[in-house]
Amino acid sequence: MPIHNYVIFSVVSGFGLIIDQVTKLCIDHGMPLYASVPVIDNFFNITYVRNPGAAFGLFAQSGFRIPFLIGVSMIALAAILVALYKSKRTEKVSVVALSCIFAGACGNLIDRIRLGEVIDFLDFYWKNHHWPAFNVADMAICLGAFLYLTAGLMEKQQRPSTGHAA
């Protein structure tokens, strides 16, 4: 991986991880568990919850959840580092994308190791229909996945066609 990509990776993943952990510490130390503060009526609250499972609470009741989720996170982090190592200087969007995913995975991994569960607090809803609460790490993972897919589609469109007309 070119040195320029290391700089991008360090800055993006470091910034994302710091923002994630600082926001979680503020919530953990500033609010009681299950407390909710309305921000935009009928749309958005800051609500302190803890998620013992994976996305949308998957594996929350499973006895093997902590070692399983920590193991999956470690494998994902290793795969991201390998992909970053193989990246080319011109793949800046992919490097930013992988850096976002790395930061988010690290942020949630820290929570799982430290607390056995993940702190969530962003609560979007409409009337009585709530999206599952999430955190900055989850946003980084989603943003990174979107950027990575977009970069892949852009790269595919820029490649010359290898098909032959019949």
Image (spheres, rainbow, N blue to C red):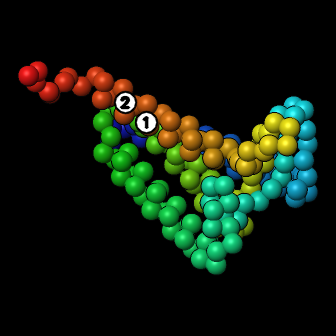
Nearer to us in this view, 158 or 58: 58
Q: Residue at x 57, y 41 (%)?
A: 142
Q: CA distance from mark 1 to mark 2?
A: 6 Å
Is residue 61 shown left or right of residue 156?
Answer: right
Does residue 158 appear anywhere in the picture?
Answer: yes
Q: Which residue is mark 2?
A: 153
Q: Residue at x 50, y 36 (%)?
A: 146
Query: Label for residue 126?
Result: none
Give the residue at the far front of this rendering.
166
Q: Which residue is mark 1?
A: 149
Image x and y of residue 5, in percent: 40, 37
Disc 1, disc 2: CB below 8 Å? yes
Nearer to us in this view, 126 or 143: 126
Mark 2 neighbour class, 10 Å CA radius: few under 14, some 14 to 19, many 20 or more: few
Q: Quadrant of residue 129?
A: top right
> Is 88 drawn above or below residue 55 in the view shown?
above
Image x and y of residue 91, in percent: 35, 32
Instruction: Check disc 1 and give the amino acid type.
Output: Leu
Image x and y of residue 25, in percent: 78, 52
Q: Quadrant of residue 119?
A: bottom right
Is residue 37 shown left or right of residue 164?
Answer: right
Image x and y of residue 57, in percent: 68, 60
